[in-house]
Image: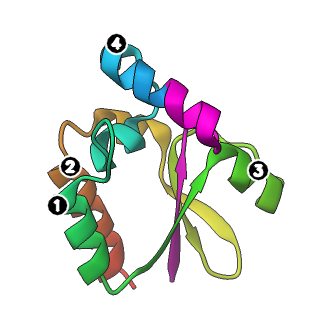
Amino acid sequence: MKLLFVYNADSGVVNTVKDIGHKLFSPQTYDCFLCSLTHGTFRENSAWKLFRQNSALEMTFLYRDEFERQYDIHLDYPAILKQNDSLDVVIARDQLASFSSLDNLIDAVRSLEKAV
């Protein structure tokens, strides 16, 4: 099983600079809950990176525009999808929004790993 993590952000340097500014000046209105859990202002969260590197799951990370270009699917972002023969949302935007910490995300991904 492969998991696709789709950020509610677009790719590119200009968009990255905008996102950093948003995180710095108005973090409470930043609309990518997945980004907020897995990344600080400038880099990937070290606990998330360690978890990701040690997980048996194959994980791919895409920006919203990359995902839509590649799969021609539009979702309520951010989202985590399972890819087998089809793509299925396994952790939706609302659930990601309810996570209060990175530990919540890691626990949810671990439960998917156990279900394999």
Residue 79 screen position, x and y as percent: 52, 48
Q: Which residue is mark 2?
A: 102
At 59% from the left and 57% from the top, the residue drawn is 62
* C-alpha separation, residue under disc 4 versus residue under disc 1: 24 Å
Mark 3 and mark 1 in contact? Answer it, CB < 8 Å. Answer: no
Mark 2 falls on what kind of element? helix
Is 34 positioned to the left or the right of 70 in the image? left
Q: Which residues are magenta?
A: 1-18
Front position among marks 4 and 1: 4
Mark 2 and mark 1 in contact? Answer it, CB < 8 Å. Answer: yes
Q: Callout 4 environment at 10 Å: few (<14), some (14 to 19), or many (20+)?
A: few
Identify the mark nearer the N-term, 4 or 1. Answer: 4
- Identified by mark 1, the residue type is Ala
Q: Which residue is mark 4?
A: 25
Is 68 positioned to the left or the right of 5 in the image? right
Identify the mark nearer the N-term, 2 or 1. Answer: 1
- Identified by mark 3, the residue type is Glu
Q: Which residue is mark 1?
A: 47
Instruction: Based on the picture, tell me whether residue 103 belongs to the magenta stretch.
Output: no
